């Protein structure tokens, strides 16, 4: 595995298998109204969906008639999407907790490189209902928000933090740190 890898080949196959489940990767639908408000309020022209899965964020935004932006999906389980694309708003919704722990730093660096103006990241902090084909919980990283914030602030300035109403995690609106 190279130093820039964001996923191992074995884990990519497990993710492709999980994505066959229609109930997997639907969290972005509940965040679409909030993202739509951000797109409109911040006058965003480009959106990158990092860990796009089946592109449910785009579906949710289209259902709300929010469509005046260019959408760039990226997901290593869907190689047809291509490489991550720079955008004014980078969304990474319920993805980070699924990252292989030893590759989290690479993913955060990747997000930092493509975020032009804002990042919207949601993180679930507890166990998932779903399990991987090898029996592990689908949330490979189960840590509190304080643990996540230490990592996120290496690359981003936190503009807003909101704990989810059910206590299952949080979301942040960030701006990239320029090095």
Image (spheres, rainbow, N blue to C red):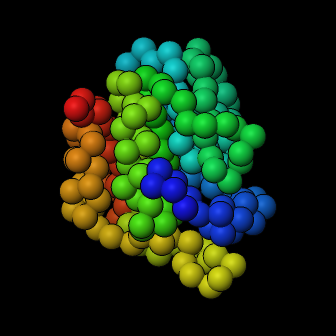
Q: Residue at x 57, y 47 (%)?
A: 51
Find the residue positioned furthest to the bottom.
135
Q: Residue at x 28, y 50 (%)?
A: 152
- Residue 38 showing in the rendered view: no
How far across and down, in percent of the image, does residue 108 sit? 38, 48
- Within the image, what quadrant is residue 63 found in? top right
Q: Looking at the picture, does residue 7 appear above or below residue 134?
A: above
Q: Residue at x 41, y 52 (%)?
A: 106
Residue placed most toward the observer, 46 or 114? 114
How far across and down, in percent of the image, does residue 130 sit? 62, 74
User: Is the C terminus in the top left, top right, bottom left or bottom right quadrant?
Assistant: top left
Q: Residue at x 59, y 63 (%)?
A: 8
Residue placed most toward the observer, 28 or 132? 132
Q: Looking at the picture, does residue 179 appear above or below residue 106?
A: above
How far across and down, in percent of the image, does residue 92 sit? 48, 45
User: Is the N terminus in the top left, top right, bottom left or bottom right quadrant?
Assistant: bottom right
Residue placed most toward the observer, 63 or 88? 88
Residue placed most toward the observer, 43 or 74? 74
Number of marks in the image?
Answer: 0
- Within the image, what quadrant is residue 10 found in? bottom right
- Residue 70 showing in the rendered view: yes
Find the residue positioned furthest to the front.
2
Q: Is residue 27 left or right of residue 164?
A: right
């Amino acid at each position: 595995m190279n130093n820039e890898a964001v996923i191992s080949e074995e884990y990519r196959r497990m993710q492709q298998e999980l994505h066959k489940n229609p109930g997997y990767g639907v969290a972005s639908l509940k965040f679409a109204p909030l993202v739509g408000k951000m797109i409109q309020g911040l006058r965003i022209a480009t959106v990158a969906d990092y860990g796009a899965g089946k592109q449910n964020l785009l579906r949710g935004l289209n259902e709300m008639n929010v469509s005046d932006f260019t959408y760039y999906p990226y997901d290593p389980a869907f190689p047809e999407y291509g490489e991550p694309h720079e955008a004014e708003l980078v969304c990474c919704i319920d993805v980070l907790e699924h990252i292989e722990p030893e590759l989290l730093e690479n993913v955060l660096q990747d997000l930092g490189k493509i975020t032009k103006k804002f990042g919207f990241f949601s993180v679930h902090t507890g166990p998932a209902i779903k399990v991987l084909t090898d029996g592990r919980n689908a949330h490979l990283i189960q840590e509190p928000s304080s643990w996540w914030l230490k990592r996120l602030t290496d690359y981003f300035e936190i503009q807003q933090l909101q704990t989810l109403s059910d206590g299952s995690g949080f979301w942040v609106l960030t701006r990239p740190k320029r090095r």
